Image (cartoon, grey):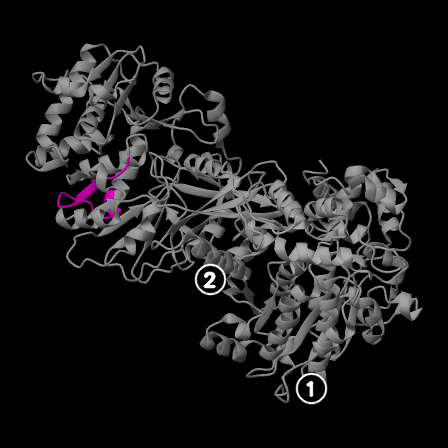
Amino acid sequence: MQPQTVLELFKQNVKQLPHHIALHSPERQVTYAELDSESEKVASYLIQNAIKQGQRVPIIGHRSIELIVAQLGVIKSTACHVPIDARLPDSRKRSIIDQCGADVVLVTDSDDATDSAVPKQSIKTLLEAPSSALPPSLMLKAEDVVYVIFTSGTTGQPKGVEIEHHSLLNLIEWHNDRFGMNSDCRTTMMVGPSFDVSQWEIWATLCAGARLYILPDEIRSSVADLHDFYREHSITHAYVPTALVRELIGYPHTPNHALRYLFTAGEKLPPIDTQRLNYTLVDYYGPTEATIYATCRRFDQSGDPGVSSIGFPVADTRVFILDEKLEPVSAGSMGELFISGQCLARGYLSSPELTAQRFITLPSCNLRAYRTGDLARFLPDGSIEYLGRNDDQLKIRGYRIELGDVEAVLSRQPGVKAAVIWVDANEGPAGKRLIAFIVPTTDAQASLLISALKIGMKKEVPDYMLPARYFLLDAIPCNLNGKTDKQALQARFAAASGDVRTIDFANEAEARIVAIWQKHLGHADFTTGDDFYAVGGHSLMAAAVLRDISEHLQVPAYVRDFYEFRSIKALAAELNRRKNASAPVPQSEPVRTLQDDISLPSTFAPPDHFSEPQLTEPKHIMLTGATGFIGVHLLETLLRTTDAKIHCPVRAASLPLARQRVTATLERYKIQLDANALARIVTFPGDLSQPQFAMEQSLYAQLGIQIDVVYHCASAVNFIQPYSHMKKDNVEGLKQIIDFAARSRLKPLILLSTISVYSWGHLHTGKTTMYEHDDIDQNLPAVVTDLGYVRSKWVMEKIADLAAEKGLPLMTFRLGYATCDSRTGEFAEYQWWSRLIQTCLAFKAIPALTNLREGLTTVDYMCEAIGRISRNPLALGKKFNLIPSPEKNLTLEDFFARLETHCGLTFTRLPFNDWVDLWKSNPRAPLYPLSSLFRDKIVNNQSTVELYQNTYLWGCTNVQRFLEDSGIQEPEFDAKLLTPYLKKIQESPFVA
């Protein structure tokens, strides 16, 4: 007969291995027979005191033999045990005891008792009593509750999770079979009793007839001591919390230890190299509600260091990844992780409503399942990629990020032993900020290490993923469960924020700027020589800071000043100079600066020819910018319309992070791909602005031979940064792309430019229309006064033309504004037009601007058109203004009129300056960070936005000719298109 409980397996081992050591602690050791006898004393006491079957018996204690004796005794009495760590605060102990409705509390030591009114009984006292036989009639059923573990979840209020015998036995039998657990094995007890992992540590060992070593407290956080302990006691199977894994496996190799498996669980595992290990690392994943573990990933000696996968389900567990409607997501798409099977808990103690919320019946298969709140997706091999918790996927300055991504990059920096990111979610001027806590590898000088980290991080992640502040710690604090103690980090941050620091300044201007920085940054951890962006500043904050500076110093200050004069000292000096100068500050870029940047190396000489199938039937495509709004939609189009593999360079610290960034972008814009398409995406780390994309020579050379055609969609889009800062990514990046396209074999270049290269040239040319073949040089007088972004795009197009003159096959698409995906309504919320729409909706008003056109279309139309035209060799050498035809080219007024007609909205028309006054002082207004576009006077006492009135009509005859008979139609901004777009726009927290 098959065993129904872990108790039955334990009793078998008592019978077969009575003198085998079961438990070993620093104080004593006991055999299986002794453990059986001692636990019967506990069971007898409970039965004599009328403890009923299934009744909850709290056990307060530390990791000890007595704790395990008590748990086993409670099980023998047919009650269920409720382990409580003695280190918990008394208030929490009382809360758990009260929720249990306990008649008695067992304590492993009299010092562990709490002030609850429930009677206490010392285990040590019971063990001194004579043995007595248990009644033979006691019977446990598989459906009985074996233990209740209390977790806090997100509420902080402890809630009990009831686990049944069959669920625990199911995991233990699978684990012991999978990892060769038998009576020759030696294991460790690492975690405290309140963590459900302790149940696995105990019962996996006792059900295998193995020996469990209870680790001394003083060695549990010391990697060196753990290594020594494993060696001295011939430990074969051990568990450590995630926080210790990286340091433990990096410890100098010890050849004579017996360790076969090192297990970990609890938090997302950072990227780790396991190739040199002479034991196997196993990463378990699972919530308490799924009986400790639900999935498992085993790293063999050739393991991929990309560890975002949590492996496959354990035992008979089933895993589902579902969307918001509880429907399965398509292969490779992100959704919420649901768990089903014998592993599921009975529910939450005395909480039927919460149980019903979290344990549901799946409509698609009628199975009971637990909704984890974790985000995941299936990988092509069927394993599961963990993408973080819903509440870890936060937004900072409008960008979605996952804390684990930032931690992974930070952990790879030189000098970092361990790192954790905490979110300061205050509602002050600084908004949400990432705070980095670092354990250094050596006793490095704090200021030097932090400076190096700031430089290193800036090279690898976007600005919105940069930590605002850094703190050095001796160790990452852990709670009783071995997980990162976020409350301790918060306390450390709060203590540092309360420090009063005097900042030296040289003059009145510096003093005023210091005070303004302190107000907006929320701290004084900087000097007058520090970079604004390196101490927590960002573009959303810059507008407010500059407004205060202009007001207090009575001198014009511009957002671009924070890029050109990034420290207090430099900015104060410039503002003092500006205040005393007689001439106004020039707003334009010298023409010569842009013209001088239109160059290629004198050695640039592309190969003579390419074959047409490289365009018409490409096997390998390079697509840059796949993590952007247009780029990721173009990725989907190319996957659907070609059979090619799409190679995507991504600015990331590793291969897994590069892939994860593309995956996250697909998910963000609700793009679903089948398994075949996902398998054709090849991501790799690359920095386009660096020679050879900062890649290994061999990989770069291989791609140079392999790639058929290059689609260059990547572009730094920033409406504030000056040209000098846009130049590196955009101008130098294009030069590297051109160099790559001409290396090894000639590759056609498909360049995505912008309609903005025409700027407000109509003020200089007097023309009303710009045709695709018109030379953009005539608009240079306007371009030099336009945004740094526009200047960089103009230079890019001129450089590409120069390369084409020297033999590079080129076609250029000048894009209008991609409002949304017409199929889903998804849009790029970081773009200025999206912020404009959100602001107008929030204030129910629009500015009176005459004939302001952006070439409004949809991203799916754009990408379909690019995908079609770019496959036609006759399109080489041509320009394509990818905007609506003149009769469908909506002005700003036209667009809002459509919203009123089709969506039932009403807007007030206001004079431009009155409309700006509505929101210019409101930091929560979506347009607030870009207020300089509406306030700063550039030419003829007009702002950038005003200058774009009455702009050109743009010819698009090439687009129309090459799309003829294609079936690709220009979008119509009607109710069908606008309704889902408006719904997504209105989901903005500000608009709502």
Tell me the quadrant of the picture where the C terminus can be found. Answer: top right
Label 1 element class: loop
Q: Is residue 82 above or below residue 272?
A: above
Q: Quadrant of the N terminus?
A: top left
* 445 or 688, nearer to the observer: 445
Residue that appears at 82% across and 68% down: 960
Magenta region includes residue 185: yes
In the shown orientation, is residue 443 left or right of residue 884?
A: left
The residue lying furthest to the front in this view is 507
- The image shows a total of numbered marks equal to 2
Residue 149 image label: none
Query: Would you name the residue on which mark 1 appears?
Result: 806
Residue 767 visible in the current orientation:
yes
Does residue 400 belong to the magenta stretch? no
- For mark 1, does the 10 Å Cα neighbourhood hold few (<14), some (14 to 19), or many (20 or more) residues? some
Q: Which region shows up in magenta? A: 176-191
> Amino acid type of disc 1?
Lys
Q: Earlier in the sequence, mark 2 or mark 1?
A: 2
Give coordinates of residue 422: x percent, y percent: 48, 42
Badge 2 amino acid: Leu
Image location (x, y in percent) of residue 220: 25, 41
Q: Seen in the image, is 459 located left or right of residue 224?
A: right
User: Does residue 710 lie above or below 186 as drawn?
Assistant: below
Instruction: Give the spatial CA distance, label 2 vs label 1.
Output: 35 Å
Q: Which residue is tagged 2? A: 655
Q: Is residue 344 above or below residue 303?
A: above
* Callout 2 crowding tier (Cα within 10 Å): few <14, some 14–19, many ≥20: some
Q: Secondary structure at mark 2?
A: helix
Report if residue 566 is visible in the image.
Answer: no
